[in-house]
Each structure stands twice: as C-alpha cells, then as structure tokens.
Amino acid sequence: MSFVPGLEGVVVGETAISHVEGDIGRLSYRGVVIEDIVQMTYLDVVHLVLFGELPDVNQSQSLSRFMAEHGRLAEHERVLVQSLRDDLHPMQMLQSMIPALSPIDAAGEYSEDASQGLGIIARYPSLLAVIAERCGYSADPDLYDPDMDYLDRFLMMMNGVPPTERESEICRVVQLLQLEHSFNAGTFSTRVIASTLASVSAVLAGGVAALSGVLHGGADEAALRSAREMGDPKNAMAYVDSVLAAKGRIMGMGHREYRVVDPRSNILKPLAIELCTGTAYEKDLKLLLALETAFNERMAEKGKQVWANLEFYKGVVYQALGVDVPFFTATFAMSRSVGWLAHFLESRENNRIVRPAAEYVGRLPA
C-alpha cells in the first residue's frame, strides 16, 4: 500500500455543496459560479449552501428573523468569555466558546441539527464582539441591533458605528467569497469529526481549530506581516529574493487547487484597491501590490505562474472595515462555519465513520 502526503489529489468523498475547478479557475456553490454568488444577499447564499436552493421571500424573511432572534449572547455566556485566560488568541477563545454556547429553542423552523448549527452561527457577531471587548479592543456588544443586517450587526458591534453602504457591500462580498471551498483542510476536519456522530458544536469547534493554522486561515495575517517586514515597496524584489534564498514562503501567493488565478482574488483585489486608496491603509496596500509584482516576476523567470490567492489582499480589506489583525481568522471562521455546517448536514445523509489506513514504517516486533 502506498500513500500520498497531504492526500493531494486523493478523492475521499462526494459533495454537492461546492465545486473547485482549479484548472480553469472556477468556483461554484451549488452550481452557481462565484461571480454570480457575490451579487446575492449574504443570507440568501447561506440558505443556498445549507439547503441546496435559493430561498423564496418567506424563507428569506424566516432565516433573517431566525438569525436576529438568536444572535445575542446570554449573560452567562458573556461571563464565560470573561473567565478565559488573558493570553489566549481570539481563535482559541472562539474554539473554547462554541461548545459552551447553550442550545437554542427553535423547534419547527429547521431540523434539529440545522437549528443548533444556525444558532451558533447567529451568535458569531456577538461572540466575536464580546471576545474583542475582552481583549481590550474598542468593540461594544451592547450595540446589538436585531433590525440590522447580519453582517452590519457584526461591523456595528466591532467598530461602534454603523458601516457605510460601501463598507457593508464589501464586507458582504468578502464573506461570500470565503463561505465555502470544498474539501479543504478545515472542512475535511469537520467531516471527519462529523463522521463520529459528534455534535454540531463539536464539529464547528473542530473547524475553528483547523482554520487557526497559518497554512490555512492565518495566511491573510501572515501576508500582511510579510509586507510590513518588507517596509517599502522599493524593497520588494530584494525581500522576495531573500525569502526564496532561504526556501521560505510568502503566504497568500499561489494556491494548491488553482493552476490559474484564484477567481476569488480577481473579485477581491479591485475591492481592496478601491477601499484602501486614499486611506490610512493605502501604505499596506502598496506594499502588498509591490510584493505581488516582484514575486510574479521571479516566478515568471522560473517559467512558473503563481498568483495571489484570496488571502493575500483580504487582511488589508479587513483592516479597512475595522477588523483588528487578531480577528482576521475569526472573521473568516464566521463565514466558513456556514460551509462546515452544510458539510455536517450532508454527511449525515449517508454517514460512515472516517477510518483511513496508515502505512507502518516503524520497527517490527522481534
């Protein structure tokens, strides 16, 4: 028996949720290409991804009402956040809190599993705001407004002021771009956990754990850190050369699935330029643009085409939306949890516990 490191190219299951066609640079959710997905409302796409179809007017209103009614943290849940260790990263706090959230009472609207999963996702904006407040940032979870859009509520609580119409629009697009992406490391982790018949809260917490790694959800923060280490756009080529000489990586450049440009990056990069130009974040934007250009040039000299993926410009967009650096990945998790829940529900339709074999390379018994 042989094995493939990282399971690259190995088919480990079936899904009808999203389709990554890396050779032609196409991503679709339930058969709808990402370019059309980003024209839709956030909760309509949530419904599409979870239940396989776009909602009618009544279903759309029902989901919006559900998310608003179940979006506040109970007082005891806020107290639990305050009891967490001071030195925990927000992702660790999020991972700890998801299984501790109380089940919701929402009989009849959706299946029990879907209701409990959506109940957790509904509380993400409040939970992240409470965690941010706990960590000393200027978030205010008491600004929760059930009449606001789901993502607008999040920005309102994180920033203390309502988002502008354009900020709201860009936040919606960013969150839709990263809502689902087939069997990536985090999603496969959730499907492994789900296969044991673990609870939906355990599955979502496991997804957060997988996403916390720099090779997965942390690439946006790492890309911004690299740009700042570079210091000045004129240093871009020298910086790239030093990283390549040390056999290092520039996070956010290239993607294991895409052989051409990541279609999500094609959508996000122009938004990053629009949102950051003329603001305090323009310097970071220029650093990222110079870093991408220099890296592309060096790769071209090697006969390779390696482009920026979604993560490369996402961090600077988050900053411009008022999301502090330690909360980049947690904000990613807020969106990707919808995909994880969809995979949880799909896996329940024909469950079989995941139990792969391993090739033993140790000593044999004497």
Image (cartoon, grey):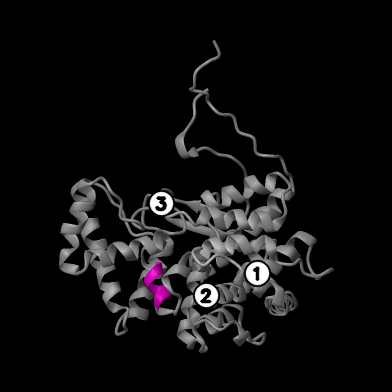
Q: Position of residue 65 (x, y in %)?
A: 72, 79
- Residue sitting at x 30%, y 51%: 249
Viewer-nearest of discs 2 and 3: 2
Q: Which mark is residue 80?
A: 1
Residue 235, image quadrant: bottom left
Q: Are marks 2 and 3 in contact (CB under 8 Å)?
A: no
Q: Amino acid at mark 3?
A: Tyr
Q: Judge from the rendering whether residue 299 lies leftward or rightward of residue 213; answer left or right.
A: left
What's the amino acid at mark 2?
Answer: Ala
**Residue at the far right in the pictured view:** 108
Q: Is residue 74 visible?
A: no
Magenta highlight range: 314-319
Mark 2 → mark 1, Cα distance in angstroms: 14 Å
Which residue, given by chain and number where applicable, does mark 3 sit on? Answer: 258
What residue does disc 2 label?
132
Neighbourhood count class around disc 2 (C-alpha, 10 Å): few under 14, some 14–19, many 20 upward: many
315 within the magenta span: yes
